[in-house]
Amino acid sequence: HYPLRRQRQMCIRDRPERMRAEIIRIAGDTGEVFGGYIRGMALVSAIYGIVTGIAFFALGMTFGKGLGGYALLAGVLAVFLYPIPYIGAFINLLIAGGVALVTKHTGFEIVVIVATVAIVNALFDNFVVPKVVGDSVGLNPLLTMFVLLLGGTMFGLLGMLFAVPLAGSIQAVLMRRFPKLARPTPMTLYRVGKERKESDSLNDQGDESLLPSEDARQTLQQKRESENASPVSMSVREE
């Protein structure tokens, strides 16, 4: 780490004084994005391994033949293989098929086991990763999916590995340089205002529900009138 730190210090020192603080802030934002990406992928991989292990255990309970005994091994391998684009998912499918063959399942059961793992892969690739990893680096889930597809199409495995943190870093730099980009869009303001109005209307309805009913108000008013009229009646009787 020392040579990298020295090179970074030299790079900052050679810049004008007014640019040093901006460079330090941008470097900090980029470091946070890459750190968030690593934490997001670690969380997704852990969840994927748990889901894979549960799937093997459930299939073992369904088909028997000792498949559930491989649930822990399959889950642990899935944790380490999933972060590798394409290759990790393909190896997980091979592991599922190999375990099904070793445990002497029928052809239909093998297809079901492999298809289950493939469905888990598809769900994580299309829903869990864009949401969890996108939130970790500050990207919209749809933008995260687009960036992954673009990176994989243009640069293959390396593109898919670094597309999300690079996109998040570019977004952080742009928002640092152009603060107006970080402001909420008109659509966001409209949605927030609409939700606030709905919340206020619900609060008003809740306050009205606490008021007494019409019959109760009439009874209370009659009681007050009788109380006010009682001194007059007593004075008439005395006369």
Image (spheres, helix red, strand yellow):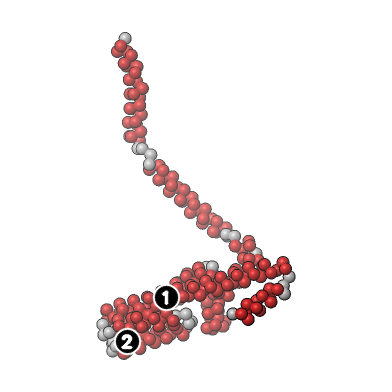
User: How far is disc 2 from disc 1 in space, using C-alphas?
Assistant: 23 Å
Left or right relative to 87: residue 186:
right
Residue at horizontal 50 percent and vertical 68 percent from the top: 135
Report if residue 153 is visible in the image. no
Amino acid at circle 2: Ala
Q: Which residue is mark 1?
A: 46
Residue at horizontal 44 percent and vertical 45 percent from the top: 204
Q: Nearer the viewer, residue 73 or 182?
A: 73
| Quadrant in which residue 12 is drawn | bottom right
Q: Is residue 128 above or below residue 64?
A: above
- The location of residue 146, given as percent across then percent down, is 53, 74
Left or right relative to 100: residue 23:
right
| Quadrant in which residue 115 is drawn | bottom left
| Quadrant in which residue 228 is drawn | top left
| Mark drawn on residue 60 | none
Report if residue 35 is visible in the image. yes
Q: Which residue is mark 2?
A: 100
Circle 2/circle 1 CB separation < 8 Å: no
Q: Nearer the viewer, mark 2 or mark 1?
A: 1
- The location of residue 75, given as percent across then percent down, is 37, 80
Left or right relative to 58: residue 40:
right
Residue at horizontal 48 percent and vertical 82 percent from the top: 84
The crowding category of the residue bearing disc 2, from other C-alpha atoms within 10 Å (few below 14, some 14 to 19, many at least 20), is many
Q: Total label count?
A: 2
Amino acid at circle 1: Ala
Q: Is residue 122 above or below residue 203?
A: below
Residue at horizontal 31 percent and vertical 78 percent from the top: 57
Label 1 secondary element: helix
- The location of residue 141, given as percent across then percent down, is 50, 69
- The location of residue 239, given as percent across then percent down, is 31, 9
Which of the two labelled residues, at mark 2 and mark 1, occupies the earlier sequence position? 1
